Image (spheres, helix red, strand yellow):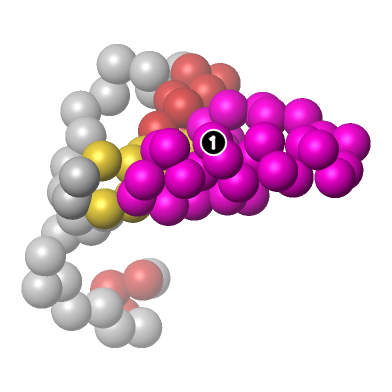
Amino acid sequence: MITGTNPTEINRFKDEMKAQFLMSDLGLLSYLGIQVLQNARGIALTQRSHMARILDTAGMKGCNPVPTPMEERLKLSRESME
């Protein structure tokens, strides 16, 4: 994996590595359903496509997304679980 902020330097480094080693350029990193998004603000890891496949498999492709997975400030107790 190669990363950096200067595309010219990245390409120069890749060319040097290719001259010394047998290697392939696989493009932007995507591994185990994790996508690496790069922009001027930084690098972010997402699993959007992986989660979309899971929702599709579960028949929930059209579900409504929520920012919190459960009710906020919910107090759980043993009695509430019965």
49 or 62, which lies in front?
Answer: 49
Q: Secondary structure at mark 1?
A: helix
Residue closest to the eye, 62 or 17: 17
Residue 33 seen in the figure:
no
Q: Amino acid at mark 1?
A: Asn
> Is residue 63 rendered to the left or right of residue 4?
left
Residue 50 lies, in percent from the top left, at: 52, 32
Q: Position of residue 15 (x, y in %)?
A: 67, 36
Which of the 4 image quarters holds residue 11?
Answer: top right
Q: Is residue 28 visible?
A: yes
Measured from the top left, where is residue 57 in percent x and y?
56, 21
* Residue pictured at 26% horizontal, 53% vertical: 42
Q: Residues within 10 Å of mark 1 (few under 14, many from 20)?
A: few
Highlighted range, magenta = 1-30
Q: Residue at x 67, y 28 (%)?
A: 26
Quick check: is 77 in the magenta stretch?
Answer: no
